[in-house]
Image (tube, rainbow, N blue to C red):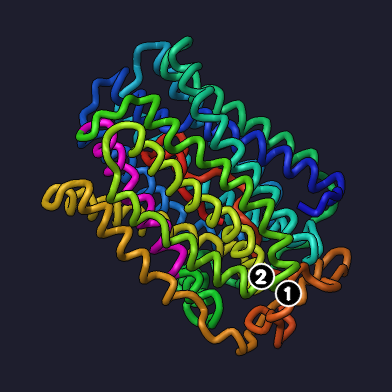
Amino acid sequence: MGGRSLGRRFGWLWAAYAASAFGTRFAFDAFSLIAIVALGAGTTEVSLLAAAGLVVGAVVALPLGPWVEFRRKRPVMIAMDLVRCVALLTVPAAYALGLLGFGQLLAVSVVVAAADITFLAASGAFLKTLLPAEDLLVANARFESTTWTATVLGPPLGGFAVGLFGPVITIAADAVSYLLSAIGIRAVGGAEPPPPAKPEGPRLTGRELREGWRFILTHPLLRPLFVNTIVVNGLIMATAPLMAVLMLGQLGFAPWEYAVAFAVPCLGGLIGARLSRPAVARYGRDRVLFVAGWLRVCWPVGLVFIQPGVPGLILVIVVEFCLITCIGVFNPVLATSRLEQVPLDRAARTLSAWSIAGKLTTASLTALWGLLAAFTGPRAAVGIAGALMLATPLLLPRNRRTPVPGSAHVDQESGHRSRNPDAGGGEEFLRTGTRLQGGDGPRLDRDTGRSGAAGGPAEPHDP
């Protein structure tokens, strides 16, 4: 991970991220649990809660990416943390008063999802101004390690807390974690470069709303990475509820066995994140991105061979461990590569567009695979998703010798520039051909597989 400090300001940002990451995983799947235990919701309502929060939240967040572009990013991040904190606190408050209903859970999940996307749009641009380019991969790897550490520890502790204190305790803890995150971001301090000048006119235009997607889809590096990432993540998440039905229903695994099968392999994410920077230093960023992108999709098809008992449990642990280790290597490198390619004056819109597309794709594929499983059975549907994933590396950038426009990573305030990024040889498709003004950053908030979304404990997250 570099073994060195990235400065006091990054230390506070990392602490804020750690607080919110642990809060999210502590409250993993809490909305579904509350809907089932406290409100008596059925399968249809729980599925609606999981999907609708993502979809409606993404639609609500659509104009917020351009809005964030023309504002200072740190105040936006703090505001979104506070919005999520207040929204989540309404759940235990309503529960204590006997007023909690399904509609409120749905409304809170929408608010949280929209705030997530807005936070992401601001955080990427902010990180770009906080660190020089040669430190970005180290920072991304540290965030990735924190994510997987929280994923290992959070759900078991949250489950224990629910057993002791009831279903809303984890929601309250998640709200507090957002408050701690806001305090940490406030403590980052320091000057922030002024945002780009807002175009004349009273409201956002359709062109400004589409700018993020236009930039991604016309960029020779970002386009294939974007399509590959949202498809792979969507297919992985689409099989998560099917694996729950298969393991807990048809194959008779105990709930604790299911939790172990998806929690223990998250250690692979920690290992992968720690390997990402040394691998890039030795083999070059483009090679690591390409190879890890291939390796991460080789494993899920093996889940089709799961059987009852200990052999089946070991199979799931091994497959998930290999998958998550490869994801742990891939995600920081992807986040850093994307960060270097996006101009600072488009970072918020581009990150917002990427996140919105990812959430809509995940929701659509989850619904589609639910219908597919109704006809083929969950085992066959999991196998089909795994087989399709084997073809997704064809979407990765293939012409590694063609330079693309990049970023010199200039901090507008301090003027620091990248000296020599942590990449080894073979960097042709990441090197800069044109000087641009900055880029986007990694994901500094939590995945919306959080309190209100369904999914397996080992779900991937958008970098």
Estimate the x, y position of residue 260 in percent, counting from the top left: 45, 31
In which quarter of the view is residue 219 placed? Answer: bottom right
- Dot placed on the residue nearer the N-terminal end, 1 or 2: 2
The residue drawn where x is 43% and y is 49% is 319
For the point 69% across and 68% down, the residue is: 196
**Residue at label 2?**
345
Q: Which residue is mark 1?
A: 437
Q: Which residues are magenta?
A: 227-249
Considering the whole magenta stretch, tell me its main secondary structure: helix
* Mark 2, secondary structure of its residue: helix
- Name the secondary structure under disc 1: loop
Q: Residue at x 37, y 50 (%)?
A: 237
**Mark 2 is on which residue type?**
Asp
Compared with 260, 76 (above or below) is below
* 339 sits to left or right of 87: right
Q: Could you say which is closer to the camera, residue 442 or residue 289?
A: 289
Which amino acid type is shown beneath numbered disc 1?
Gln
- Where 38 sits versus 416, above or below? above
